[in-house]
Amino acid sequence: MKFSAITLLLAPAVCLGLAAQNASPAEVEALVKEAIAFAKSSGKEAAFKEITKSGGRFHRHGGELYVFVYDLEGKVLAHGQGAAKVGVNQIKAKDADGKEFVVERVQLAKSKGKGWHDYKYRNPVDNKIEPKTSYIELWEGLIFGAGIYKK
């Protein structure tokens, strides 16, 4: 009985620790593919709504891993960090080093259809600018992506 009570008391702490761990590149790619599959089966608008919904099915690791969707002009169509980003054209957005990472994202999508790219971005968990790598995939003229923070 003691073991069960202790296990129940420690379970939330263990789960919170696991939620804050870094996602693997394979998990990032799988999440992007899952979001595209959801858009195919439920429609783009339903997918955009679910991707943008706080705590929705496309948010993992305590909010550190999330999906985003851009058009090929750099306009945000859905974003796991919230609705305030939706509708904003980010084509000229620069990271902390001055890198136009959305331009790079669009170029990658147009030239290869999918792949990884590096930049710096604000981590929603600790609110710090951190190195990040994102996997993007082009589907029906839309860039679906997700990324992991390099720690």
Image (cartoon, rainbow, N blue to C red):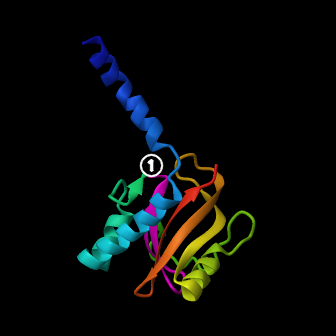
Q: What kind of element bears circle 1?
A: helix
Q: Position of residue 59 (x, y in %)?
A: 40, 56
Above or below, 128 relative to 38? above
75 part of magenta stretch: yes
Q: Position of residue 16 (x, y in %)?
A: 43, 37
Q: Position of residue 93 (x, y in %)?
A: 63, 73
Which residue shows up at 44% across the image and 43% down it? Answer: 19
**Residue matched to label 1:** 61
Q: Position of residue 58 (x, y in %)?
A: 37, 60
On the image, which quarter does residue 41 sit in? bottom left
Please give left or right for residue 6 compared with residue 22 in the image: left
**Residue range (magenta):** 62-82
Number of residues whose C-alpha sits closer than 10 Å to that of mark 1, classed few (under 14), some (14–19) or many (20 or more): some
Which residue shows up at 46% across the image and 69% down it? Answer: 68
Q: Nearer the viewer, residue 26 or 86?
A: 26
Farthest-out residue, top: 2
Q: Quadrant of the N terminus?
A: top left
Farthest-out residue, front: 26
Please give left or right for residue 96 compared with residue 86 in the image: right
Report whether residue 34 is seen: yes
Farthest-out residue, right: 97
Which residue shows up at 51% across the image and 44% down it? Answer: 21
Which residue shows up at 32% across the image and 73% down it? Answer: 37
67 part of magenta stretch: yes
Q: Amino acid at mark 1?
A: His
Above or below, 91 relative to 146? below
Report whether residue 81 is seen: no
Number of marks in the image? 1
